[in-house]
Amino acid sequence: MLSGFLPLMASAADATTAADFRAEEDRRSFADALFSRGLHKQAAIEYQRLLRDFPSPKDIDVVQFRLGECLRLSGDRVNAILAYKPVTENLTSQWRDAAMFKRATLFLELNQPEAAEELLRILLEAKPKAEVREMALYYHSATLEAMGQNGPAITELEALLKEFPKGPMSDYARLALGRLYNLPGPSRNEARALELLQNIANHPTQPRLGAEAIFLLASHQYANQQYPAAADGFARLFREYPDDLRIAEARFPAAWSYCKGGRAQEAIALADTLLAAAPPPAPDVAVELRYVRAQSLFQLSRFEESARAFSEIAADPAAQANGFAPRAAYQAALCHFKRNAYAACQEAVRPVLENVDTRSEGLWLFAEAASLEGTNAWDNAIEGYSRLIAEYPDSGYIPDALFRLGSLHQKRGYWLDASVAYHTLAERFPRSELAPRALFASAASLAKAGQGAKALLDWMTFLRDYPDHEAVPEALFQQGTELIRENRYLEALNAFDRLLREHPENPRVAEAWYWRGALLRESNDLPASIDAFRKCLAANPSDAVRRDARFALALALQAHEQDAEAAAIFQELLNDPVRERFTSGQLRWLAEYQYRRGQFAEAAQTARHMVGQSDDDLARQIGWTLVGRAERAANHAAEAEAAFRAACDLPVTSTSAPEATIRLAQLLLDRGDNENAARYFTRAVTLCATPELQPFRIHAYVGLGRAALAQGQKELALRYWMTTAFMYHEPEVLPPIIRESIALAESLGKTEEAESLRKTLAEYN
């Protein structure tokens, strides 16, 4: 039964002595004494001799078990396995369970988990004592794990905790479960794993277990990219268990965790410590630690130092070998970008473009830097974004690149190119947060390009696909204004009505009311139009919209024959820049209305605006005539004469020309310039040749008569007046002139003419 190792042990015994005449009891006692004193190699020799010389000693199972223990404790695991075997085969031995357990653990140590698992399974089926069962459950789970059977291993450990929640192996079981539950596979239970590990970490029964739990927790968080939590965990491990065997293994992931967890200064300090260690780290590890250090400098906004560090790493052969060089070169360029050195960034990033792994990021950074450098670098930006879009159509940068490209085209006024970029974004990435903004910008670009119909399609698509977007009110407004440009007034009115109905608090409400009023006025619904303009003014519009709305309100009021309010608004607007929008006809209406109301100063001011704003001589002649009329009514003779003269001097003949000529002649006559008065009255006669101007001709003849009379030419004066009396019938003007003509005729002794004039006068009675 011990043939595998007895010859070896026997030869060793023979070398010591040729014959041993000690009694069995003495030999047993001596071997036990060596065993109790920890002299396991010597004790193993004695136990072997005892079994050789006395094949069936008293309590042979004890001797065999202790021999196995001595060999195990001496490091001779193979012979220990053979020594325990007879005990495991002795069904009556009280040491059988212990021997089976010891033998199984040795098989596990020798990487023979199948043999270990068979022994432990048999042992557990035999229902050993509690202390052995607890150990057997734990090691059985270890053998199952070694065999790749994580699920059954977890089952055994959970059974251990259920039976022995406070047993000596319970925390070891919790540690093992924490590790197993974190492994990928159907048994993964991250919440349970963290619960178990946290429990041990916070309430360890011994330092080693606490340190191991913290290490496993931090490692789990590091593997799951939970860097702040991992950094906290590693820092706790260093603080609470500075001498634990896991410390050396934890430093490298801790440095990365500090860096990625926002603890840049601690990352730099730890990286410096590891780089200065003796012996120094391997070149590839050293490069990675330098990268951690440079990245941490970057986080502290120490961009110049960081740029130098990354540049040095990029040039290091070790970095080129382990793949850190392209990334470091990119980071160096990014440092230049962060310190607003955009030209330097573009130059530094060029080598990055040559590496397939970093080219897409490099193109993005190159384009971004160029877009910010200034207008002179926009060509570079457009090229960079375009190449990125063409070469990496599935890159995560594409939505932003398309949006930036569209924005650059907009800045240059390339509206159609901008629309193409924005449209591509919206169509390819409809779920991107940039998609609605892009579709909106496409519509605006098309509108700028004069592509109203296409712009409308984009507005309608935007409103259909993104009904809850914050820009919906603006889209409705833009849709409405574009529909107006397309002469689709009813649809435009519907768009503004929807804006007013669904978004009553939006800043565009005032403008929407304005356009609603304009559209209603266009359809001749004047009451509704006036109401809309009033609501626009009540909605606190901008100054520009307020001007437009008041002007439009005045026009609507005028058209609705609410002249007083219309005129009041027009008058106020004459002191506003919006007066440039007044037509000559509107200014004429206002001046004439003010004249009729006796507001002569206001009428003169309005008429002067009419003259000043118009390039048309006909309108200017009418305007000067209105100025003269108002000034004359205000008894400002000089101002009136100047105005009428200006009207008469224009090389045109409007409907106001006869009036201006006659009124100028009358003013000249009033101040005694009879000769010039007669000249202008004569001119007026010529101007009034058409039938519709005959009333003015009456005044011209009357004026000629008075001019002649003032010059002492009584017969000529009588001739003018008689011509007027006999040719025209004008009850408002002629009766006084006829009576004056009768008196003049009688004074000249022309009784026949006087009698004829009396008959004409009688016709008015």
Image: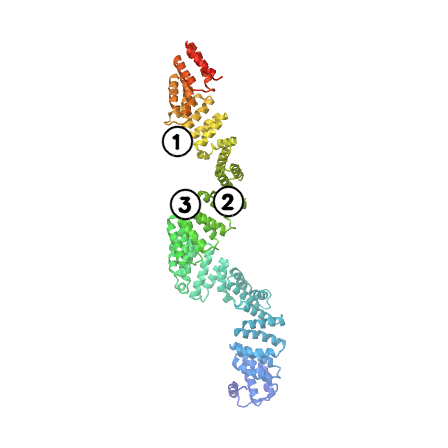
Q: Which of marks 1 and 2 is nearer the N terminus?
A: 2
Q: Which of marks 3 and 2 is nearer the N terminus?
A: 3
In this picture, is 367 found above or below 483? below
In this picture, is 359 found above or below 74? above
Quarter placement of the N terminus: bottom right
- Residue 611 at x, y percent in the picture: 42, 29
- Residue 252 appears in the rendering: yes
In this picture, is 243 found above or below 92? above
Q: Are marks 3 and 2 in contact (CB under 8 Å)?
A: no
* Residue neighbourhood size for the residue with mark 1, other residues' Cα within 10 Å, grouped as few (<14), some (14–19), many (≥20): few
Badge 3 is on which residue? 450
Which amino acid does the dot numbered 2 rest on? Answer: Asn
- Residue 31 at x, y percent in the picture: 58, 84
User: For residue 197, which quarter of the picture?
Assistant: bottom right
Nearer to us in this view, 528 or 48? 528
How far apart are the two marked residues, 3 and 1, measured between alpha carbons?
31 Å
Badge 1 is on which residue? 616
Which amino acid does the dot numbered 3 rest on? Answer: Gly
Q: Do the residues labelled 1 and 2 touch (CB within 8 Å)?
A: no
- Residue 33 at x, y percent in the picture: 59, 82
Badge 2 is on which residue? 494
Which amino acid does the dot numbered 1 rest on? Answer: Asp
Q: Do the residues labelled 3 and 1 touch (CB within 8 Å)?
A: no
Name the secondary structure under disc 3.
Answer: loop
Q: Earlier in the sequence, mark 3 or mark 1?
A: 3
